Image: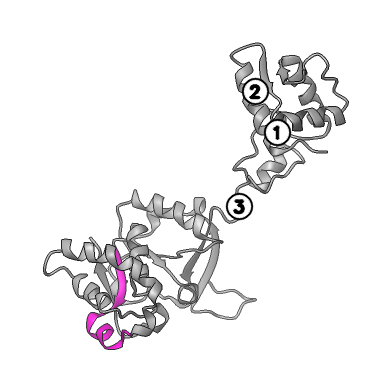
Amino acid sequence: MTLSGRARAGLNGVVRELNRQPLVEKPRSKWVEDVVAWCHQKDIDLTTWISNQTLRFDANLLAQINSMLESDRLAPLGHSLSGLSSAAQAIEGLEEDKSIREGPRAKRLLINLPQQPSTWLAPESRSIRDVDITSLKLAAFGALVQVENLDSFYVFSPEIDALSGYANPLVVYRGDSHYGGGFAQLEKAWRKTNRPHLYAGDFDPKGVTLALDSGATHLLLPNIEWLTQHVTPLHMPAEQLPFQRRLRQRHVTLPDHHPLRPYLVLLEKQRGLKQQWFGGELVSVGLA
C-alpha cells in the first residue's frame, strides 16, 4: 500500500502547521483515513494520537511516518511532487504520480530551422527540431512566426518577402494537446522582447481570433487581391460564427485606412480560406 496523493498533500499541510504549533488535530476525513490505513499497514501504532473523531499529529508521529517513508525510499513529508517532471520525481524517491507531474512536453516546442545537413539523413529543405523552451536564446531571433497548422508548419519557409526585414525569424508550431503548453510559455516570454510576432494560420474568424489571443502583432496572409478571388464559403463552417462578433467589434475601432479592414470585410461576407490553400504572395498585415 502506498501513501495516497491526497494523504501526502494533507500531511504536507500538517507539516506547515506544526511549524507554528506543537499539536495539530484533524477530523477523520478521507485523507486522514488514508493516513490511518497506511499507518496500520506499516505497523505504526496510533493509540496515542487517534480517537473515533480525530487524529492528532505531533513531531513524534511525523517522525515515525518519515522514517517509514525513508525505508521505502519515498520522498519525505514536506516535499511536494506536484509540477515535477518524472525525472525530478525520481530524485525525490521511487514514487511517481503522473496525475500531478509536469508533462514530458510541458516545455517542448516544435521549431522549423534552416537545413542542417547530415551524413545519415536525406537532404531536406528545412529541419524540424523538438526543443526545450529554456534552451532557446530569444535574443538571436528578430521575429516570431507562429504557424497554426502542423502540415503547413512542416513545409513553411521564412524565405519570403514579407519576412525579409527580420533577421533569423523563429518559426514555431502553435501547438496542440502535445505542444500547446510549451508555446504558451514562449508567447509569454516573447511579449517581453517587444519584437514582431507574426501569425500564419487559417483565414477565418477563429484563426484571426487565435492570433489576437496569442499576442500576435501581424498576420501572414495572401495579398487582398488574390485572397478576394479565392475565399470560399466552404471554408467558413457554421461553428465559426461565434467568433464573428469580436471581429466586428474590432473592425469598427480601426482607422479607415487600416490594412486589416478589407480582410475583416471578407470575413463578414462569410467567406474564408484554410492555410493549406494559400497561394500568391504572402504579406504582413498589422493587427494593432
The residue beneath circle 1 is 30
Q: Residue furthest right?
A: 43
Residue 275: x %, y % from top left = 39, 78
Sooner in the amino-acid sequence: mark 2 or mark 3: 2
How far apart marks 2 and 1 lie (CA) works out to 15 Å
Name the foreground residue: 124 vs 204: 204
Is residue 177 in view from this perspective? yes
Q: At numbered mark 3, what does the secondary structure look like: helix, strand or loop? A: loop
| Front of the two marks 3 and 1 | 1
Figure check: 280 above or below 169: below
* Residue type highlighted by circle 2: Val
Q: Residue at x 75, y 30 (%)?
A: 33
Asked if labels 3 and 2 touch by Cβ distance under 8 angstroms, the answer is no
Asked if labels 1 and 3 touch by Cβ distance under 8 angstroms, the answer is no
- Residue count near mark 1 (Cα–Cα under 10 Å), binned few <14, some 14–19, many ≥20: few
The residue beneath circle 3 is 103
Q: Is residue 15 magenta?
A: no
Name the foreground residue: 152 vs 264: 264
Q: In screen coordinates, is 107 left or right of 273?
A: right
Q: In screen coordinates, is 136 left or right of 268?
A: right
Task: Give the residues drawn in magenta, as a range.
Answer: 218-232
Q: In screen coordinates, is 98 left or right of 170?
A: right
Name the foreground residue: 112 vs 271: 271
